Image (cartoon, helix red, strand yellow):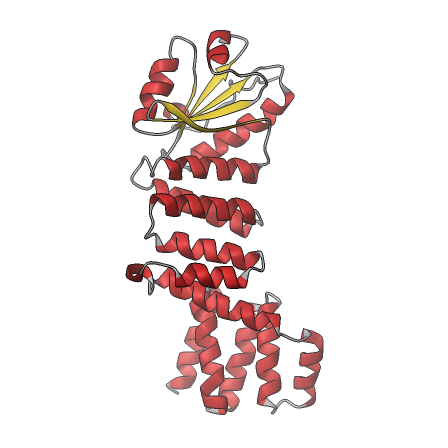
Amino acid sequence: MLELGKTASAPGAGDLIKDVSEASFMADVVDASETVPVIVDFWAPWCGPCKTLGPALEAAVSRAKGAVKMAKVNVDENQMIAGQMRVQSIPTVYAFWQGQPIDGFQGALPPSEVEAFVARVIAAAGGAEDDGLDEALDAADEMLETGAVADAAQTYAAILQEDPVNARGYAGLARAHMALGELDQAEAILNGAPAEISHAAEIDAAHAQLALARQAQDAGPVNELRAAVDADPANPQARFDLAQALYANGQAQEAVDELLELFRRDREWNDGAAKTQLFTIFEALKPNDPVLLSGRRKLSSMIFA
């Protein structure tokens, strides 16, 4: 059986993840942490939870691409260090920055919480590498997309402590509160963004997402609204309501299709509501989203036909 700490590392990972002894601890942890944060994993070959946590930490550190490093300490072979760090149970993890422990935990954590921990360490160190905060933001975005909303919110907040004018951090924190159903809190966060970033693309996108989230609170059942449109295809309000319900149900493509059909039938209805709603959806989507790219192309062809 391959022991933890002897796991084959990805090519190029040797400088990021090291087995550390009492002789090398000062150089590989304390001194190294002067320029980049170092996460220290205290483990033992007989420790079951260590065999789960170790690979998760290694994967998260590798994904950070140099924004953080990892040192692995076998407590059976390095009892003096474990004693000095007051390690009473394993796994125990400490994060070092500029020679001092700044964070840590005991016991195995799920992958989402491991990612959150690594991202917090990077953010707390101010992004030790040039792209450190970007890596932390990427990790927070991934947490949010995979449902680890609380971890994402905590990471965005840590990033904003280090960079109070980070538009992506503000937008991400607002989206986390939206995911929790806390729309008023999300609005307060966006409205509290510093003036110099208040019209950044990320902030504008979050405002659009918030507007759509508020609409979703009043959206009716998709099946009933679909039946109403089928019964009277020329009813613009029914089709508009269906589009809102579809988007609220996570069916962005279908919502855009209905709005495009409404625009085709009557582009001036309700002061151009179909086009306005399309623009709101487009702003809320990621710039490379296929729904956005296709929808914009179709709308443009209708406008300039």
Whether residue 292 appears in this view of the structure is no
Count the marks: how many? 0
Going by the image, does 66 lie left or right of 85?
left
Which residue is at a point 43% across and 75% down the rendered structure image? 279
Q: Quadrant of the N terminus?
A: top right
Q: Say above or below: 223 vs 87.
A: below
| Residue 248: quadrant of the picture | bottom right
Going by the image, does 266 lie left or right of 37?
right
Asked whether 62 or 244 is in front, the reply is: 244
Percent of width and height locating residue 142: 50, 48
Percent of width and height locating residue 81: 46, 11
Which residue is at a point 55% across and 38% down the rendered structure image? 113
Which residue is at a point 49% across and 85% down the rendered structure image? 263
Q: Say above or below: 179 vs 90.
A: below
Whether residue 268 appears in this view of the structure is yes
Asked whether 23 or 197 is in front, the reply is: 197
Percent of width and height locating residue 286: 44, 61
| Residue 171: quadrant of the picture | bottom left
Q: Quadrant of the C terminus?
A: bottom left
Asked whether 172 or 304 is in front, the reply is: 172
Which residue is at a point 49% across and 45% down the rendered structure image? 154
Q: Say above or below: 254 vs 17.
A: below
Percent of width and height locating residue 34: 30, 25
Q: Say above or below: 198 vs 9.
A: below
Going by the image, does 149 lie left or right of 267?
right
